[in-house]
Image: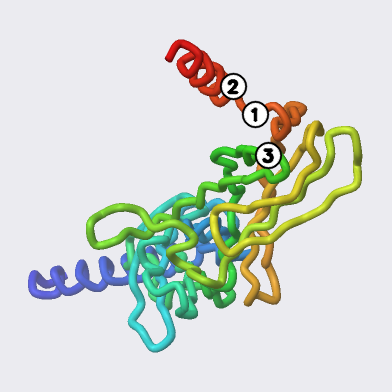
Amino acid sequence: MCRTCLPLTVLLVCSWLLRGHRTLATETTSIGKAVNVRWSSINGKTIIEWEPKPINYTYTVEVAGEGANWKRKCIHTTATECDVTDLLENVNDTYTARIISEVQDTEDFTEEFPYTDSPPFVPYKQTIIGKPVIESYNFSKDITKLTVIVKDPLTPYRFSNGSFKSVRDIFNNDFEYTVFYRRASSTGKKQETSNSNEIVVNVDQGESYCFYVQATIPSRSQNRDSQVSEEKCTTASKNASAVGSTSEFIFLCSWMLLCCLL
């Protein structure tokens, strides 16, 4: 064999072996496609979830609003969920998430990476409102009214000063609370709705009451109601209207004693 032919022969053999290796790698590199892509969102904190667990490949998530460019998150992850809250700044926009299956060595995979798009998601319409918290409650002086004060759940969204926005800051007037209450000795419930954090209900003197709170977004056709709060119960109230408070009684006695001494 001539010396000039030897390098050419070696080059052809190496080229043939490399081509066979790539063909074999392409055939043996199996990339799964994401399925069951779904949104999970509570109080604005939003996670995209999917299946299956990857083997010999990874996932990358892309999210885009209507008419916007795709933004990447959770790049080359082996997890099957991704927190995309920070990509959903406009709560009224309609978002789509794209789950891309990838391999690191692109020489082993010459085709376009498979991907699956999520259903559309609008945070304002679809995020679930979490469980409200009853901050405090108190009776009126004559013990005929019970005032329930509710703490608004916080969202991951922030004001310019860095403080977190509450769900009320997001939904504004499209947000209300309903208190469901009953006598402790009864199962019959009544309810009272308010657009503020304070709900006032009429009660009977001398009765104990149990109550819980639920938030509602009236404009929604689905996912209107939040989870319900923990139930609270009062102790039996006393009739204070006839006798008055202890401090008032002491003041009256002191005043009468002073008049007698003068």
Per the image, the residue denoted by label 2 is 249
Q: Residue at x 20, y 70 (%)?
A: 11
Q: Position of residue 235 (x, y in %)?
A: 73, 27
Find residue 58 and report its image quarter.
Answer: bottom left
Mark drawn on residue 142 = 3
Q: Which percent across, then down, holds residue 88?
A: 40, 69
18 or 189: nearer the viewer: 189
> Looking at the image, is 255 positioned above or below residue 82?
above
Dot 1 amino acid type: Gly
Position of residue 215 relative to residue 189, above or below, is: below
Residue furthest out toward the bottom? 67
Q: Which element is circle 2 on?
A: helix
Three-letter code, disc 2: Phe
Residue 158 seen in the current view: yes
- Numbered label tally: 3
| Mark 3 residue crowding within 10 angstroms, few (<14) / some (14–19) / many (20+) | some
Mark before the other along the chain sequence, 3 or 2: 3
Mark earlier in primary sequence (2, 1): 1
Quote the CA–CA distance across marks 1 and 3: 9 Å
Q: Identify the residue position indicated by label 1 in the image.
A: 244
